[in-house]
């Protein structure tokens, strides 16, 4: 006699051990044995989600709700998987249906938590905070609920949200590090502290703006960063011992650095140094390589016209890539608005796309310098960005680079944007040189693109007249 509960328990155990590929075999076998079981479909949806096969997880969850329409957890799986592929309305409806059907505090807390995460990712930070509080009331031990509550407050510029940021380090894509027996840094002055990045390149650049504050309070500072940022950070923070070992399993550090007094994620510095809008200096804090800058200056001076960096895509499928993607045809009116040398700041090879675009639009001077952008050393990119006249970019890492260098940057911001771009006008406290041009409805880029065109014409028409 086959017991579906045993199969489900075994597969879930493998998922918890990051062995989803093995769990998938059990999920398939379970569906084969119980083809009309909503529980079997829910299990398969969970395993597919763990394997990052989000469209498959979604389809399996849809079928699970059809087979088990009164099972709260089938609606939870549908909400989670729909969220991953950005079917926002369907995900919200699924979580709310699951909440109505919930029979236990644990089930209701899970629905509130899922709803909070969805609302956060779609920029509805106030609503996200409400549902995060409900999830936490139902399950006071939930790390995810605490993280959602803190992040939703940060999205509203309620800077007390930093106090809960530490709970976000347990979420996917973030990590808590320990280099020995040290404890997390509590702000005590005079200690040797190792700081580390915990997210993507853009996040690491942004949070590094708080490092100079920490240097003033620590006896000695060590920085464990992405290898791409090592040289740029060494030059920019001369009082910091920088290692590009963030993803290394074995750290070949100097002996005196291997046992710090304390350690802390860069993002956690906010609770010490960014408690008010006024505490964000918004000033440049990175220093590009002067020799490489000189090379670019020599090259760009030959153009005898404005040189503008441009990037049109950003993110990953699970970070809203579909909302952070334009085509060169979308930006054609921008590049036609003034006579400029347009420099691709795409971090992936766009040579074929650019060649096809230039063939169709021979009057537009758009180029890719691969040795500056398709490189494992972000110092190359920083030198290029430092010498363009300005940057026009989709929400992506190069925005943080431009802001950190003090380079003027116009950001084409999707409606579903990241919390650091919270809807408080066109400025961000993180960077004084960055301006946010917001999309007001999904898929409609006419507003922000038109704004870019107007600003470019105004600026360069005035320059030509002068």
Image (cartoon, rainbow, N blue to C red):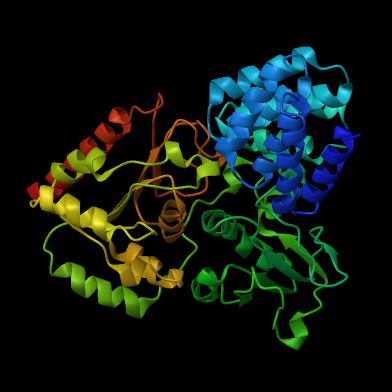
Q: Is residue 273 left or right of residue 59?
A: right
Residue 215 % position (x, y): 66, 68
Answer above or below: position of 250 versus 409: below
Is residue 146 in view? Answer: yes
State whether residue 133 appears in this view.
no
Image quadrant holding the N terminus, namely: top right
Residue 50 in percent (x, y) is at 68, 45
Q: Position of residue 361 (x, y in %)?
A: 11, 48
Nearer to me, 464 or 261:
261
Above or below, 394 against 416 in this view is: below
Q: Tell me the residue at 53%/27% (across/down).
A: 87
Question: Whole-percent x and y of residue 239?
Answer: 61, 76
Q: Residue at x 76, y 63 (%)?
A: 177
Front residue of this view, candidates 353 and 456: 353
* Residue at figure coordinates x 81%, y 41% from the top left: 143
Q: In which quadrant of the rendered view does residue 443 lie?
A: top left
Image height of 108 relative to 220, above or below: above
Measuring 70% from the left and 65% from the top, which residue is drawn there? 195
Image-quadrant location for residue 178: bottom right
């Amino acid at each position: 006699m086959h017991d579906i509960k045993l199969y489900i328990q075994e597969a879930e155990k493998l998922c918890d051990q990051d062995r989803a590929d093995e769990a998938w075999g059990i999920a398939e076998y379970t569906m084969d044995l119980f083809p009309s079981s909503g529980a079997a479909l829910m299990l398969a949806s969970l395993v597919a989600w763990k394997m990052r096969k989000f469209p498959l997880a979604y389809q399996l969850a849809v079928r699970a709700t059809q087979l088990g329409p009164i099972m709260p957890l089938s609606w939870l799986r549908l909400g989670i998987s729909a969220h991953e592929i950005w079917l926002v309305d369907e995900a919200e409806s699924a979580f709310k249906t699951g909440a109505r059907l919930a029979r236990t505090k644990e089930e209701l807390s899970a629905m509130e938590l899922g709803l909070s995460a969805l609302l956060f990712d779609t920029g509805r930070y106030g609503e996200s905070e409400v549902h995060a509080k409900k999830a936490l009331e139902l399950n006071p031990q939930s790390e995810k609920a605490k993280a959602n509550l803190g992040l939703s407050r940060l999205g509203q510029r309620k800077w007390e949200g930093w106090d809960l940021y530490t709970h976000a380090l347990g979420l996917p894509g973030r990590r808590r590090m320990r280099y020995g027996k040290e404890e997390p840094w509590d702000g005590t002055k005079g200690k040797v502290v190792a700081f580390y990045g915990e997210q993507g390149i853009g996040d690491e650049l942004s949070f590094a703006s708080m490092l100079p504050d920490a240097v003033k309070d620590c006896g000695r500072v060590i920085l464990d960063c992405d290898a791409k940022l090592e040289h740029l950070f060494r030059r920019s923070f001369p009082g910091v011992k920088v290692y590009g070992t963030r993803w290394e399993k074995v750290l070949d550090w100097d002996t005196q650095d291997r046992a710090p007094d304390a350690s802390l994620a860069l993002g956690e510095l906010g609770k010490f140094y960014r408690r008010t809008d006024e505490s964000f200096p918004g000033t440049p804090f990175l220093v590009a390589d002067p020799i490489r800058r000189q090379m670019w200056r020599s090259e760009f001076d030959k153009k005898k016209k404005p040189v503008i960096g441009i990037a049109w895509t950003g993110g990953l499928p699970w970070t809203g890539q579909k909302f952070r993607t334009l085509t060169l045809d979308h930006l054609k009116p921008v590049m036609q608005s003034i006579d400029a040398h347009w420099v691709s700041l795409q971090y992936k090879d766009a040579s074929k796309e650019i060649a096809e675009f230039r063939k169709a639009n021979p009057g537009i001077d758009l180029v890719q310098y691969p040795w500056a952008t398709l490189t494992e050393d972000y110092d190359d990119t920083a030198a290029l960005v430092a010498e363009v006249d300005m940057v026009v970019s989709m929400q992506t890492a190069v925005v943080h680079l431009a802001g950190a260098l003090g380079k003027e940057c116009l950001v084409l911001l999707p409606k579903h944007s990241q919390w650091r771009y919270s809807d408080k006008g066109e400025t961000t406290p993180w960077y004084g040189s960055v301006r946010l041009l917001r999309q007001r409805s999904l898929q409609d880029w006419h507003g922000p693109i038109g704004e870019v065109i107007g600003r470019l014409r105004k600026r360069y028409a005035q320059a030509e007249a002068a």
